[in-house]
């Protein structure tokens, strides 16, 4: 089967199911594992990712709207002749929209199946493996991988059971301040924390700095949506310059962390389970079988 993935999380799922050799097209943001680098790219972004967070936010909310943030190379897509196109209809700022994909597919001579993945919760993220597995005729492989992921989740939950649950604010954007929603609050809870400012499955909105101060988090997680950890570190001064920054319990206790958002938090794929293992290490010092690296979680001070 010839697969085109227009969603990085879907690429992760295809890889998890052992079907990387069937992947014939991907997005410009699909960067895991290293083997995907040889797969043709069929999308591009209309926003310069080197801009500061406030500038990106302005671009997204101003001249650019929804699917106009991304373009699909319809000619290349047609040349790839996919049997299955994986996309999403959850967030038009995070990936190519279903509407745009559907329009591109209508131009093809042979209509491939278009499968939209829209998980909002941790359970729905895991179920996406079953859905894609069914589409690929790999139901048994999907069931095995889901079982393995659930086992890892059970291990984490067992190791943090009974421990004090620190109050956690996770920010998926720094300017403006935007709390991480959807499955991230569940990741925090599974790792033994108490998620603040966002609930399970919630599609969040920007919050004020006063709201963060009033939440008084014990731990502050910085995971700007789709940006590498280096970007969060570079923009830390945006937060550190706000009134009352040094009075936050998380800052006083050196419990501000920059996490690898694109790998483990922003993408609703199988690697969110690794994100939970990383969080258990951050919140409770739990060491998973595969040690947590400085790229995955870095404590910062200011």
Image: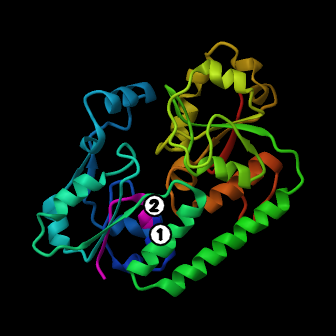
In the rendered structure, the answer to whether residue 289 lies left or right of residue 262 reads right
Question: Residue at label 1?
Answer: 13
Q: Are circles 1 and 2 on residues that touch, CB within 8 Å?
A: yes
Return the x and y of residue 150 as percentages of the image width and height.
67, 71
Front-most of 217 and 123? 123
Q: Magenta stretch?
A: 1-11
* Quadrant location of the N terminus in the rendered image: bottom left
Q: Is residue 7 magenta?
A: yes
Residue 297 lies, in percent from the top left, at 67, 47
**Residue under numbered circle 2:** 9
Distance between the Cα atoms at labels 1 and 2? 6 Å
Q: Quadrant of the C terminus?
A: top right
User: Which residue appears at 39% of the width and 29% of the height?
Assistant: 57
Q: Is residue 302 left or right of residue 19?
A: right
Element at badge 2? helix
**For the residue carrying disc 2, how many other residues have a C-alpha within 10 Å: few (<14), some (14-19), or many (20+)?**
many
| Residue lying farthest to the top in this orientation | 243
Q: Dot 1, how many residues are within 10 Å of its Cα: few (below 14), some (14-19), or many (20+)?
A: many
- Any magenta on residue 292? no
The residue nearer to you, when weighing 62 against 99, is: 99
**Is residue 104 shown above or below 110?**
above
Q: Say whether residue 292 is visible.
A: no
**Residue at 64% of width from left, 60% of height from top?**
274
The residue at 76%/18% (across/down) is 247
Q: Relative to 2, say whether 128 is above or below.
A: above
Q: Position of residue 45 (x, y in %)?
A: 29, 45
Residue 190: image quadrant is bottom right
């Amino acid at each position: 089967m010839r697969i085109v993935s227009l969603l990085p999380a879907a690429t992760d799922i295809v890889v998890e199911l052992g079907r990387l050799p069937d992947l014939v097209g991907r997005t410009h943001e699909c960067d895991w594992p290293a083997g995907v680098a040889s797969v043709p790219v069929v999308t591009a972004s209309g926003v310069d990712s080197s801009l500061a967070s406030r500038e990106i936010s302005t671009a997204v909310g101003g001249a650019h709207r929804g699917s106009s943030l991304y373009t699909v190379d319809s000619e290349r897509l047609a040349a790839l002749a996919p049997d299955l196109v994986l996309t999403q209809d959850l967030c038009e700022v995070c990936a190519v929209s279903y509407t745009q994909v559907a329009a591109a597919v209508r131009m093809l001579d042979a209509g491939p199946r278009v499968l939209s993945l829209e998980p909002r919760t941790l359970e729905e993220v895991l179920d996406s493996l079953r859905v894609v597995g069914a589409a690929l005729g790999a139901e048994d492989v999907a069931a095995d991988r889901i079982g393995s992921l659930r086992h890892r989740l059970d291990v984490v939950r067992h190791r943090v059971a009974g421990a004090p649950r620190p109050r956690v604010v996770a920010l998926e954007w720094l300017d403006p301040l935007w709390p991480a929603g959807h499955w991230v609050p569940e990741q925090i809870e599974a790792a033994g924390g108490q998620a603040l400012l966002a609930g399970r499955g919630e599609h969040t909105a920007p919050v004020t700095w006063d709201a963060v101060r009033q939440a008084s988090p014990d731990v502050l997680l910085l995971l700007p949506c789709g940006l590498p950890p280096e970007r969060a570190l570079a923009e830390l001064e945006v937060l550190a310059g706000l009134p009352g920054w040094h009075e936050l319990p998380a800052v006083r206790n050196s419990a501000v962390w920059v996490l690898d958002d694109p790998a483990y938090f922003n993408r609703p794929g199988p690697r969110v389970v690794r994100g939970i293992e990383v969080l258990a290490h951050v919140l409770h010092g739990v060491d998973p079988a595969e040690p947590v690296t400085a790229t995955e979680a870095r404590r910062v001070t200011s």
